[in-house]
Amino acid sequence: MNFEIDEQQRDFAASIDAALGSADLPAVVRAWADGDTAPGRKVWQTLADLGVSALNVPEEHDGIGAHPVDLVVALERIGAHCVPGPVTESIAVAPILLASDAPRSAELAAGELIATVAIAPEAPRAVDAEFAGLILVGSGDRVREGAAAGSHDSLDPSRKLFDVNVSGDGWAADVQRAREFGALATAAQLIGAGQAMLDLSVQYAKQRSQFGRVIGSYQAIKHKLADVHIALELARPLVYGAALSLGADSPDTARDVSAAKVAAGEAGLLAARSALQTHGAIGFTQEHDLGLLLLRVQALRSAWGDTTAHRRRVLEAI
């Protein structure tokens, strides 16, 4: 099976990279953590202008109705740039839960509405509920609207979690499919963040000198970074394979999505550890951009199902 993305998808990824690369995302993330979401809203509008917010919205609701692989392409780049906000929830999950709501689906596609989601047990609290214009709570096969209650800090200061109070009878929706998209979207961002940390580490290893030699010339550093590269290259096909399963409504979707989430989480963790070891203590200071990625990976590893839960699903499917 060929997991290479095509030229159009590569161009799409490059356009996202170019737009986010010029937006000074580290400053945006730091402002977001301090409660200033205005720069972040501009980034979200940029993503909407590129069509990212419309990817998972059906064409009949003014969306693109893209294949899940296209969603993974976009979310991997978003993860690499550490975009703040309810990325998984608004771009990947909410369109599934609002599939029967044409007006609000169209608002999602246009970037006029940003939503967050809570679905227990994988995502019991809503991410950045104070930023979102709509809070959705899924349970069983129904969805209800919610209101933010108490807030909780997470490992990532730019990623606040909120308890949610629900109201109304709600409507029917494919909540299980929304769960799968949540895990897949999170896995894609973990791959992107892991690759970004590897790139930063390689760049730093070529510049930092110790004992009269650049540290990248030492075998220990070379092997450590090579291990990260291998882990990412092994995890990435699992993520794309899970996207193909979701797109085909395969009976193996749950297994494939969980395998992708586990592999992406482990690769992201290895990238984080190796990046911190390569950079030393400077890598974990808030003044260094690496620190933002380190915290984001730690938060995403447990989002939409932790490693233990997804390993259990894979085991049950074998």
Image (tube, rainbow, N blue to C red):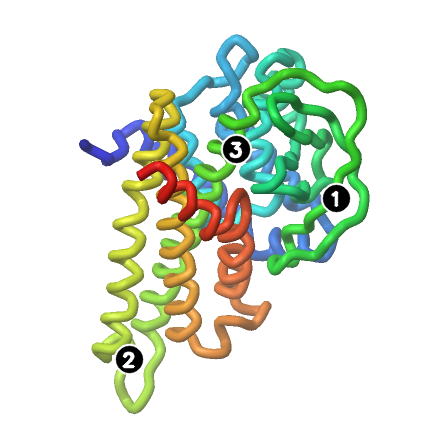
What residue sits right under mark 2 in the picture? Answer: 214
Q: Residue at x 55, y 13 (%)?
A: 62
Count the marks: how many?
3
What residue sits right under mark 1 in the picture? Answer: 163
Of mark 2 and mark 1, the one earlier in the sequence is: 1
Of mark 1 and mark 3, the one earlier in the sequence is: 1
Q: Which amino acid does the dot numbered 2 rest on?
A: Val
Q: Is residue 79 left or right of residue 205?
A: right
* Quadrant housing the C terminus: top left
Q: Are marks 1 and 3 in contact (CB under 8 Å)?
A: no
Residue furthest to the top: 60
SS for tag 3? helix
Q: Is residue 316 above or below residue 50?
A: below
Q: CA distance from mark 3 to mark 2?
A: 45 Å
| Mark whose residue sits in front, 3 or 2 | 3
Q: Is residue 92 left or right of residue 35?
A: left
How far from the left and from the top, in percent, is residue 183? 48, 39
Q: Toward the viewer: 277 or 202?
A: 277
How far from the left and from the top, in percent, is residue 150? 80, 48
Residue 179: numbered disc: 3
On the question of residue 209 being in view, the answer is yes
How far from the left and from the top, in percent, is residue 274? 37, 69
Q: Residue at x 61, y 58 (%)?
A: 156
Q: Is residue 213 above or below residue 41?
A: below
Q: Toward the viewer: 113 or 128?
A: 128
On the question of residue 21 being in view, the answer is no
Q: Residue at x 57, y 16 (%)?
A: 99
Q: Are marks 3 and 2 in contact (CB under 8 Å)?
A: no
Q: Residue at x 35, y 34 (%)?
A: 242
SS for tag 1? strand
Residue furthest to the bottom: 211
Few, some or many residues within 10 Å of mark 3 (<14, 14–19, 20+): many
